Image (cartoon, rainbow, N blue to C red):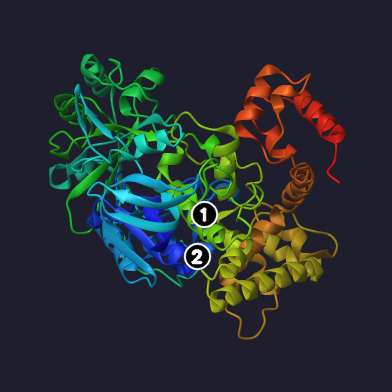
Amino acid sequence: MYDVIVVGGGHAGSEAALVAAGMGCETLLITMNINFIAWMSCNPAIGGLAKGHLVKEIDALGGEMAKVIDRTGIQFRMLNRSRGPAVWSPRAQADRLMYSADVKKRIENKDNLTIKEGMVVEILTDKKRAVGVKTSTGLIYEGKAVIISNGTFLNGLIHIGLKSYPGGRAGEVPSTGLTENLNKLGIKSDRLKTGTPPRIDGKTVDWEVLAVQPGDKVIIPFSYQTEKIEREQVSCYLTYTSKETHKILLGGFDRSPLYTGVIKSTGPRYCPSIETKIVRFKDKERHQIFLEPEGLGTSEYYVNGFSTSLPEDIQINGLRSIRGLEKAEIKRFGYAIEYDYFPTYQVKYNLELRTIENLFLAGQINGTSGYEEAAALGIMAGINAVLKIRNEKPFILGRQEAYIGVLIDDLITKGTDEPYRMFTSRAEYRLLLRQDNADERLMEYGYRFGLISGEVYDNMKRKREEKERIIISLYDKKVKPLEINPVLESVNSSKVESTVNIAQILKRPEIKFSDIQKFIEQEKGSDTLEKISPQVEMEIKYKGYIDRQLSQVKQTKTLEGKKIPGDIDYLKIKSISSEAKEKLQKVRPLSIGQASRIPGVNPTDISVLLIHLKNMPTEK
């Protein structure tokens, strides 16, 4: 008998199990192969555009992903440095074997957490409540809450050319029976597709002709609990496809599962296969190809940008037409995989199924793509499963609080019929949700749930207080032209003719924090200035935009505060469009704010709904 049972040991399942155990619940993690815990099925990297924000938020809540990549990363980069701070995103290459081994070690040494190998084929229920699971060999484990996080394994089908075979990923069997069991319980499923590129032998690559992509000289850790990373980094390499490459690939389309109709499900729009790219972008003569190391102890390289399910001979010839890869040997061929997922209109904001109590869904079976999205859903499902057992209020993050909030709201309110990928453009308050301030936004929650120690939490508060003190001092500190003009002249900025405060100077685009640092009075013994100076600079330079977004958040909260009864029958409301009735009845929004974000529900429908709610009889 366990408190929480987690099915599946990928990135979602790992975070869910660790957080449930960390909150004091007896937790069981059942996975099909304990040697592939948190395995990187696709690219050997963590983070990236917007995904890096998710990792920082997971860390602030008390999750593991950021700490693991800090320990096992072999190259670190902060992306989008040339653009505004709202879209800066950390990314790191990982040693694939080290990463998985590190997570497994964390799980095996975690108090309250047991790991077992097995295939779950049935969710046991009693009066529409999950009470345990049953494995393919007939073993039964009882539990108060169950989290399903099977990734791409549910009825997985792998495609290479016109050859197809069952598999959860290359070399592993699929998970069968569970989808059918959930269908019998009234849960609807559908199919999605994703893919992966070939892996090549680095000894057969002509590295001299490729462009080197080094890591950052100064590494910014993912985790707020990592003091410093000082490690020799490996490089990635850049090359390009050519017209000849595209010609070779097109020659294999008569044996392509994508273009012969063998694959019927939808793939990721924003991470398309190479065959999709050369069709969708016909005018482009070349596409970027990044060679990324799989780890320190292997010569295997991941060919990022060349995801494909074309036949083996086409993959070989296509790769060898790329500069630097003329003699490349493929160690593992690229493939596509189709798998079951469960459309998210069937779950609540706490990731619990609407129709089966205490049964939660997390990860790619929610329709997402990527390790980071999966881990974010995993930690939220783990926290909420524990809160449900304790009869406590569910933990729900708003769109204005976190990218995790955007992720879950998008999935439930807007739905997805293709693998969902997080982007900074999906967050309307992205200037408030920067990667550098996730600790200030979310660490209080992690501390409250017992996932963040008092020492770590106190350090965050001290850092925040010091940041606020310095910002105030920059507005208070006045400098005369004689003092500041030499600084302005040194960076070719126009001189001032009267006394100004330092904040006004820092708002200038050409002025950096280091230029005005000498005017700051730092508290004795404080060593936080170096850490907080980027935040200070951002918050002063972008104050106008930040204040505008805070005002928008205040307006949005008004709409979110207008709650909608759970039993309302939208089909009976007159003057609402037929499409809006259908969508509202399906999603069953909790508030006017959520209803207004549903595709197909227009402002007129919202106005009618507000009038209807106003005229509804109130309970005495």
Toward the bottom, the furthest residue is 524
Disc 2 residue type (three-letter): Gly
Residue 273, image x and y in percent? 33, 29
271, above or below 379, in the image: above
The numbered mark at residue 380 is: 1
Tell me residue 285's x, y (percent). 35, 22
The residue carrying mark 2 is 62
Q: How many marks?
A: 2
- Is residue 115 or residue 2 the one in the foreground? 2
Q: Is residue 604 visible?
A: yes
Horizontal arrangement in the rendering, residue 267 relative to residue 449 (left or right): left
Three-letter amino acid code at disc 1?
A: Met
User: Mark 2 or mark 1, which is nearer the start of the sequence?
Assistant: 2
| SS type, badge 2 | loop
Q: Is residue 179 above or below residue 229?
A: above
Of residues 15 and 285, the one drawn nearer to the viewer in this rendering: 15
**Residue 544 placement, left or right of 111:** right
Q: Residue at x 85, y 62 (%)?
A: 498
Q: Give how far across and how far down residue 542 sits, in percent.
A: 70, 52
